Amino acid sequence: MQQKVLIVEDDADIADLLRVHLNELDLDVDHLASGDKVMPQLTHQHYAIVILDIMLPEVDGLTLCREIKTRYPKISVIMMTSKSSEMDRIIGLEMGADDYICKPFSYREFQARVKAQLRHIKLLHEPQPQTATTASPVVIGQLQIDPHFHELTLKQTPVDLTATEFDLVLFFARHPNQVFSRAQLLESVWGYDHLGYEHTVNSHINRIRNKFEQITEHTIIETVWGVGYKLNAKPLQQEMQ
């Protein structure tokens, strides 16, 4: 069964080009030119990915991103922005966007980002082969992760994470106390290594921290200034004592 993708873009030429590149990935594509039609469309069609332009008539892309991720958190959202609008990219990620891409972009980069999201979606919805490395639960003190059922609990409290957030925490948990740069995380978790997209990592970690902070006072994912991030196993293990 084909995965469905919704393009929300008021420029017909750009939308047609994106459709061609998505069809090459064997994806079923719908297109809307106005932001006010998106939420009604999502009520009667299921989409794996929504590709949103920041600048849209009627309802802007940032507002739409927040509404989509609030009502449909499992839908992956990719924002399209201009290279000059860094603040829009940061705000979009903070509102829940799973990724962003800067105009102008190459079709190879666009397809790479879409395929990265499809991989996360596949891991979320399809049972994975039972192997010791991919399916075994990961337990670090009060943090328990079940990759097979895509479940994470902290202090016995379930934490609702997006597919990408889950994969990011799982990667850290499999390498506790090890420091990773943003570039390493992009390559290992997102599946690409393009420079200039470090905000994607920052924003996902901030969202994970916000969810963890509702359960524990400890900082689980720490910033190592000038280097990157690590999962600090010590407070998780201390809370077991």
Image (cartoon, rainbow, N blue to C red):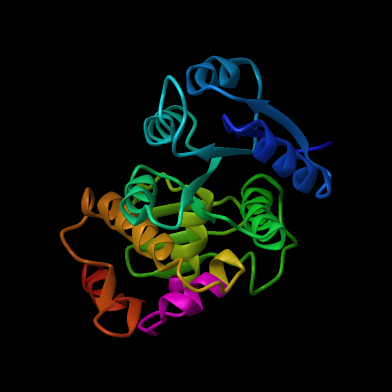
- x then y, percent, for residue 171: 50, 71
**Position of 202 relative to 4 (above/below):** below
Q: Is residue 213 left or right of residue 48?
A: left
**Position of 165 relative to 168 (above/below):** above
Going 49% across and 23% down the picture, which residue do you hit? 35
Q: Is residue 174 visible?
A: no
Going 52% across and 61% down the picture, which residue do you hit? 167
Residue 107 colored in magenta in the image: no
Residue extending farthest to the left is 217
Q: Is residue 39 left or right of residue 228?
A: right
**Position of 159 relative to 56 (above/below):** below
Residue 186 colored in magenta in the image: yes
- x then y, percent, for residue 38: 54, 22
**The quadrant where residue 206 appears:** bottom left
- x then y, percent, for residue 2: 81, 37
Q: Which residues are magenta?
A: 172-187
